[in-house]
Amino acid sequence: MSLSRDLRDYKELKGNMMLEGVISEAFLTLEGVQDEADPQFAFDMIDLFISDAESILREVNNAVRDLRQLNLVLADAQVHQLKGSTSCVGVKRIRTLTEAFRTCYLQGSVDGCLRIIKELNQEFVFCKNRLLYLKNLGMQIKAAGGVLP
Amino acid sequence: MVMEIGECSTRRLKALIVDDKNIERKINGRALRNLNFETVEAINGQDAVVRVLSGETFDLVIMDRSMPVMDGVTATKILREMGGKFKIIALTSDAEFKDEFTAAGADKFFTKPLDPKELEEALRKFELIA
């Protein structure tokens, strides 16, 4: 009974996360390329994305920590890296912000850049929690012998 | 009756995945291994050039654009100048670099993320897979 409920929850969660822009077809593609030899590939990529994004955001935050010595060139380079990483899992919410940052950077809008960096940090926390919840539910289903939808 | 031993069956094709981001190397590598490629990774353009200079042979190169030390467009140009005949598929977040990559010698250009079905179609057109 619990397994069937978990399966329903997983399917619903994935649907909601697609609507929220936390995952996209890119994540479905990751699920599509995993096989019996590598059954957790999509979840492993979630972990990799989170680890990469945390590292990148640390660099971005360090680059703008001192308001008297902002390094927006470095921040821009790191945000561009983040854009690439988000494409892998399909985290559209963060990708959109990376594009907005680029626009502000090219326009020379320091306030805009700083505002978006703050939003990036907030969005990442939201997306990370959703992704880890999806992963943990998926692992729970697999441990119980279920097949993910 | 004498039985003759036939020649070895077709060798496995080999792809070099050039990207500074581990997650992208892993994902693109997975897609290629599903198409029965053997995969090797390079962390930037220079690493890719060094591998080819050292004599490693490849049938296909997946080349990211933005990398430290040596970017993908530069690496593509150098690999072609070195006489590299392998197919090069360029991969980038921005479509604006398509012309640069094509001028450098890339055979195909995709924006990220790489779609396994589009990859398979491109490899069929290259006649690398059936």
Image: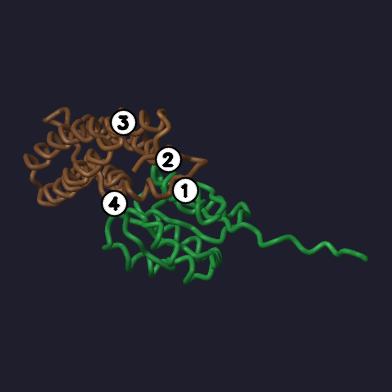
Chain colours: A brown, B green
Which chain hosts label 1?
Answer: B
Q: Amino acid at mark 2?
A: Phe
Instruction: Between label 3 and label 1, give the one nearer the viewer.
Output: 3
Which chain hosts label 2?
Answer: A
Residue under numbered circle 3: A137
Q: Are marks 1 and 2 on the same chain?
A: no
Q: Position of residue A93 (x, y in %)?
A: 18, 44
Q: Residues within 10 Å of mark 1 (few under 14, many from 20)?
A: many
Residue under the point 33% across and 31% down = A3
Q: Return the mark for residue A25.
A: 4
Q: Amino acid at mark 4?
A: Glu
Relative to A106, is A137 above or below? above
Relative to B124, is B24 above or below? above
Q: Are marks 4 and 3 on the same chain?
A: yes
Q: Return the mark for residue B30.
A: 1
Instruction: Between label 2 and label 3, give the one nearer the viewer.
Output: 3
User: Quarter holding the N terminus of chain A?
Assistant: top left
- Circle nearer the N terminus (2, 4): 4
Are dots 1 and 2 in contact, CB under 8 Å? yes
- Determine the image quadrant of residue A77: top left
SS class, disc 4: helix
Instruction: Between label 1 and label 2, give the one nearer the viewer.
Output: 2
Q: Position of residue B71 (x, y in %)?
A: 39, 53
SS class, disc 3: helix
Residue under numbered circle 2: A41
- Circle nearer the N terminus (2, 3): 2
Instruction: Between label 4 and label 3, give the one nearer the viewer.
Output: 3
